Image (cartoon, helix red, strand yellow):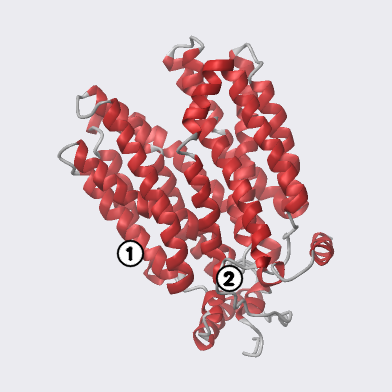
Amino acid sequence: MASARYTAAARLDRLPITGFHRKLFGLVGGGLFTDNFDIYVAGAVLGQLIAIGFSDLGQNATFVSATFAGMLIGTIGSGIIADRYGRRLTFQFNLAVFGLATLACAAAPDMLYLTIFRFIAGIGLGAELTVGYSTLSEFTPPARRGRWQALLSMTSSFGLLASTMISWALIPVFGWRIMFLIPGILALGLLWLRKSLPESPRWLEARGRFEEADRLVTAIEREAIAQSGELGNPEPNSVSRTEGVWQAKLIRPLVLGTILQVVMFAALYGLVNWIPSFLLKQGMPINQSLGLSALMSLGGPAGAFIAFTIVDRIGRRTAVIAGSIVAAALSVAFGQVTTQVGAVVTGFVLFSLIYFLLATIQAVYLPELFPTAARVRCNAICIGIARLTTLVTPFLIVSLFNAYGISGVVSGIGILLVCQAVSMALLGRETSGISLEQISELSSEERQLIATRSAS
């Protein structure tokens, strides 16, 4: 077992994957799955609300806006709370807010109360995404970090599929309230399970709480020794003591992270969510458009699985640049297909590439770019700015579609993906196989050398 002269980060980085990591993965992944499940509930629920006269189109639009407003507040607020008061507290707080508010949505007497409760639930929804990926990254060894972060994204992506299937099966039988009752109960169940969630030893050391960090890592080491035998000595490492986010060395990753997130949000909310409407506008019956969209949406888990298998092998920089270029070409090709079979095949591959990029960027790369003491705040800034762009994205999409049709929309998305590839080529630094503490300190040449040695 390592002595206390080594940092918690160095001791964690040389551990094998143990039952502790799998349990942590389940607690974080369960929250992200529930989060994604609830985000996509709105589409099915709002249609039902109009059908039964509970709401109208204007009220539905306010409901959606309130959700995104709450998520924006949750994103920014969670960054401040998680870096100042800890990851564990933030995880408990956001699930409590989300769970209770979502159960309140299930009991809402009218659309006004439903919208108010949804705004509050949105605060919890926004917090989960920001904190979840960052927390797991602080426990996972560098050699396996990309795989496990991508697997976390894949777990989250199944929330869309589950939400779609459960809405289809349960709303006709039990009504719309069941779709808020389910995620509310899941969130409160996870809140109870997360009582055993440990604080991040990296964060504890960044706050000067070395004894607490040592106790936590020692317990994890005991489990690793019981599983794998004697452990090797840690590599020398430093403690992240960065406090503020407005520092010269963070400008470059903040700019890059924001560009990457803005492009991915544009691709998700400007293409993936609008495909059924595009197909309907082109004269396809609604049952066919929804069916084709469902088939294409299977590309979500598929893309995240591809990231799981290759992102540690080829590196983050190569994955984002190559994936963006291929996705840009396919997005343009999607606008030119004239058959249903061609639309499904091209759409499935395109969706897979978009979710491959989402997993690589949002789950794997972004949490690696920033030092522990400012990691969640910096993530929150990038995601928060991207969320702001979603306020104008629908209007731009409609304008492009009205002027140039679906080919104009997908060509616009393609241009953004090319810009993403260029930004990564100019500003991106390889982080694969490197300790989180070294990433913010090493030069680009040193990063590349370590990543090459890790790959070999």
Q: Residue at x 73, y 34 (%)?
A: 326
The quadrant of the picture occupied by the C terminus is: bottom right
Mark positioned earlier in the residue sequence (1 or 2): 1
Residue 58 disc label: none
User: Residue 96: x and y, percent?
Assistant: 31, 60
Please state which of residues 368 and 145 is positioned toward the viewer in this rendering. 368
Please state which of residues 28 and 240 is positioned toward the viewer in this rendering. 240
User: Residue 258: x and y, percent?
Assistant: 59, 50
Left or right: 30 as drawn, with respect to 236: left
In the rendered image, is residue 158 in sight? yes
Q: Amino acid at mark 1?
A: Trp
Q: Is residue 335 above or below residue 123?
A: above
- Give the residue at mark 1: 192
Give me the C-alpha separation between circle 1 and circle 2: 26 Å
Q: How many tags in the picture?
A: 2
Alpha-carbon neighbours of circle 2 within 10 Å: few (<14), some, or many (≥20)?
many
Which type of secondary structure does the marked residue at label 1 adopt?
Answer: helix
In the rendered image, is residue 30 in sight? no
Q: Amino acid at mark 2?
A: Thr
Q: Residue at x 55, y 22 (%)?
A: 400
User: Residue 363: x and y, percent?
Assistant: 58, 53
- Give the residue at mark 2: 372
Left or right: 356 as drawn, with respect to 176: right
Q: Residue at x 60, y 75 (%)?
A: 224
The quadrant of the picture occupied by the N terminus is: bottom right
Location of residue 372 (image quadrant) = bottom right
Location of residue 64 (image quadrant) = top left
Left or right: 177 as drawn, with respect to 139: left
Q: Is residue 276 above or below residue 230?
A: above
Q: Nearer the viewer, mark 1 or mark 2?
A: 2
Left or right: 422 as drawn, with respect to 100: right
Which type of secondary structure does the marked residue at label 2 adopt?
Answer: helix
